Image (tube, rainbow, N blue to C red):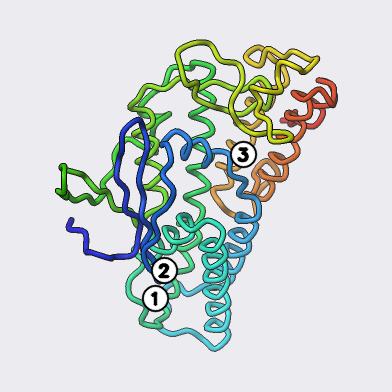
Amino acid sequence: MEIHEHEFGLYLTLEEDGYIKRTLISESGAEDLPSTRIQDEVILFSELNFKPYTMVVDTLQEMADQIDLEGKDEMTTEEKEKFDSFISLVDNLLIELEKEQPIQGLLLRTTIQDSLPINDDSAEYAYLATKIIPEQLRAIVDYNFFLNSLFINMYIKNPIIEDTDLYFISTLKIQQQLTFASKLTIQYFFRSLVDYYVFLTMQFLNTKPTVTRCECCGRFFVPKTNKATKYCDRIVKNNLTCKQIAPSLKHKKIVSDDKVVEAYDRNKRKMYRRYERNDGKVYMPKKGLTYDDFYDWNDNATEARDKYLNGTISAEEALKIIEVND
């Protein structure tokens, strides 16, 4: 498919040593984004806290569930008011995202635009919008969950089963064009946020990376060399990195064999499976849960894991917070 010059979206070029060059085109014009490495962008996305976002998505789902327009030719005044409120909240969410996370905000907006027909103010359009918009907004959180699960499997060296573990990234159709200045260059174009992260994940996995976990902060990273590396380069305290402060810590944790970290990973997967039973619905039987439920647990469990790794609470205290009863 041909890329139309200056069409809203993200334009990406692969550079040397795993770096990417990106230009974001929106109503504000063209903005060249800082160059970054693919692995850094993928790992950063996996660490995003979606709790504030998912609270709004849950509210939107509730609002959508209260607008029943299936098979209707026209909306009542009350239905029109409810739908307008629904769309207003969607716009507010996207506007805030575009301010704080320009890529996520714009590509979620274009994803929704491309998923819906032209707005003709009909009941049919409103019906489609209330079904499709929450689904598209949830998709990026689903991909965040998927990526976290993939990293855990890579870290503990579980065999990756392509038909199941890589279900999100088996195929991808994207727009691209060739340009020639001093050299031939392929430019990729995205109007879908999930497609953008799927593309980066494909490029990331193609390098056959080693994913490990920092024994100081407990987060994933890719070592710069094949040499065994225990600590990452994240800045964690007083402008110092894990690699700089870890040797001075009195406690020594072997994270790969640590019962607290293992419990954190195991329970995170368990909580995600409970969310999958929910499938994005707000009301669910007792073992289902919403996005908000998941992130309430995740915030507390991540904090407990980090405090344990930093030596401020015991393993028993951390496990009381992390472990989830079946």
Q: Is residue 21 above or below residue 26?
A: above
Q: Residues within 10 Å of mark 1 (few under 14, many from 20)?
A: some
Residue 252: x and y in percent read 74, 13
Circle 3 — which element?
helix
Report which residue position mark 3 lands on: 274
Q: In the image, what residue occupies the spot 55% across and 42% down?
A: 276
Residue 116: x and y in percent read 36, 67
Q: In the image, what residue occupies the spot 58% across and 59% down?
A: 57
Q: In the image, what residue occupies the spot 16% across and 50% down?
A: 179
Tally of numbered discs: 3
Would you identify the image quadrant in which residue 192 lies? Answer: bottom left
Can I make out residue 203 in this image?
yes
The amino acid marked with disc number 1 is Glu
Report which residue position mark 2 lands on: 128
In the picture, measured across the screen, residue 268 lies left or right of residue 248, that is: left
In the picture, measured across the screen, residue 183 lies left or right of residue 171, that is: left
Report which residue position mark 1 lands on: 124
The amino acid marked with disc number 3 is Arg
**Quadrant assignment for the C terminus:** top right
Query: Would you say the residues marked 1 and 2 are in contact, meaning their CB atoms lie under 8 Å apart?
Result: yes
Circle 2 — which element?
helix
Q: Pick the residue in front: 36 or 143.
A: 36
Can I make out residue 301 in this image?
no
Q: Residues within 10 Å of mark 2 (few under 14, many from 20)?
A: some
Q: Pick the residue in front: 98 or 68.
A: 98
Q: In the image, what residue occupies the spot 50% across and 21% down?
A: 223
Cα–Cα span, label 1 and label 2: 6 Å
Q: Pick the residue in front: 222 or 194.
A: 222
Query: Would you say the residues marked 3 and 1 are in contact, meaning their CB atoms lie under 8 Å apart?
Result: no
Q: Is residue 100 above or below residue 245?
A: below
Return the disc, 3 or 1, that comes first in the chain's sequence: 1
Residue 81: x and y in percent read 57, 83
